[in-house]
Image (cartoon, rainbow, N blue to C red):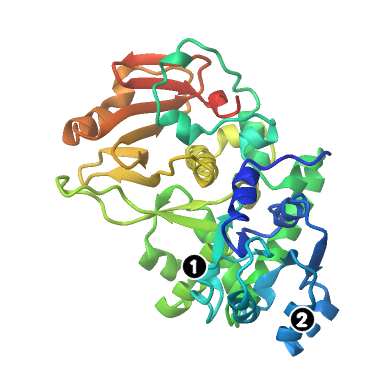
Amino acid sequence: MKYLKRSIREDIENYLNYFPVLLISGARQVGKSTLALHLGIDSYVTLDDINMYQMAKNDPKGFIEHLEKPVIIDEVQRLPQLMITIKEYVDKERINGEFILTGSASLVGFKDISDSLAGRIGIVELYPLSLKEKYENVGNVVDIFSKNLDMFLLKKYDNSSIVQNIIDGGYPEIQKIDHAKSKYLWFSSYIRTYIESDAKELANIRNMDKFMNMYRLCMIRSGNIFNQNELQKECGLDNKTFSSYFFVLEHTYQLQKIQPFFKNELKRLVKSPKIYAIDTGVLCHLLRITNTEEYEVSHYKGDILETFIYTELLKANTYASSRAALSYYRTSDKKEIDFILEFSNSVVAIEVKASKSVSKSDFKHIYHLANEIPEVFSKGIVLYNGESVLKIDENMYAVPFGFLIS
């Protein structure tokens, strides 16, 4: 399978002109090393190599000084204290684009070095492949949704591959595997090998079985309100241990919290966050969903679909020309909108429906929000399983899932 160009690559090449250090952060197996190696930089070391690791640990200053620059340092989360040495090096003579680091944990997850490179480092978060990347199409849905959609009216889009893409998820290696059993083995190995490895590096986890049970219980609640007390009881963990474990899951890019949309003029809003899995392939594996038939009859179908849309918005937002704050909307009297894209002076509301048709009633909660914040409300979108982009009202649109591919 040929290399699929990542949409964020152009941004990365631009960042190298302005920062001496660039960190490409993301989950293991998401394609960080492959992306870095396609930047045209010859000097490369990985801290997964025991010899390189020992050299860097024993003599970090000498290790950094003797590397040919610019250099890619892979799996830097294995030795986060190396960041201090890099800071000292770049402070002597700031040359932009000298260090490209990759790490399978977010910078916040690195112990003791959270702001040691402040002002010197550009941070790029890489997620699994988006639909547009898989099909090698350009464009950004967050940017598109922020603009007028009239130019797309009555255009038809193919939804036939959406469910298979949901089941496969976006990890690059899975795209090379056709056999269902081989996919199952890959996901099983990924969860055990990579999640455990990162967990051990980030936290002192004494009971890995309890951690993995908590991981599964949190993942299968994707698309739901995050109720920590309820989860703690089910996992059999105290508050401190649960919080520590959840920190690991967030900072190794397995789960994310999404906060509720809030405006001062809005009252009676639910204040708890929702949680989402970062990859629906892993989520489907944990739910033992391996084909379209199992997906269609699954009790979790709606949550999985919502999670999939979340991941597509999340990926697009990383390289959008105008990044949006991504949240959800829910009132105490059960008015709910799946996603809110909040730009500097406008709001786009997005609802997800599995049906093949859409009516005005599907926008009822979006209309409610539009009436609450008329000065900033831009448009409402219902993503659905039909084939055409439809205009339901002046600023209300029905958009097929296949639109996310094209």
Report, in whole angstroms, how far the alpha carbon at label 1 lies from the one at label 2. 23 Å
Task: Quickly name the residue at label 2.
Answer: 63
Q: Secondary structure at mark 1?
A: loop
Mark earlier in primary sequence (1, 2): 2
- Amino acid type of disc 1? Gly
Mark 2 residue crowding within 10 angstroms, few (<14) / some (14–19) / many (20+): some
Q: Residue at x 48, y 28 (%)?
A: 354
Residue 60 point in image, percent of width and height: 72, 84
Residue 187 point in image, percent of width and height: 72, 53
For the N terminus, give its image quadrant.
top right
Residue 26 point in image, percent of width and height: 62, 58
Q: Residue at x 38, y 33 (%)?
A: 350
Nearest the viewer among 303 and 149 is 149
Relative to residue 112, is residue 400 depicted above or below?
Answer: above
Task: Quickly name the residue at label 1.
Answer: 119
Residue 208 in view, yes or no: no
* Horizontal side of residue 386 vs 56, given as left or right: left
- Amino acid type of disc 2? Phe
Residue 99, image quadrant: bottom right
Residue 203 point in image, percent of width and height: 57, 78
* Horizontal side of residue 310 vs 63, given as left or right: left
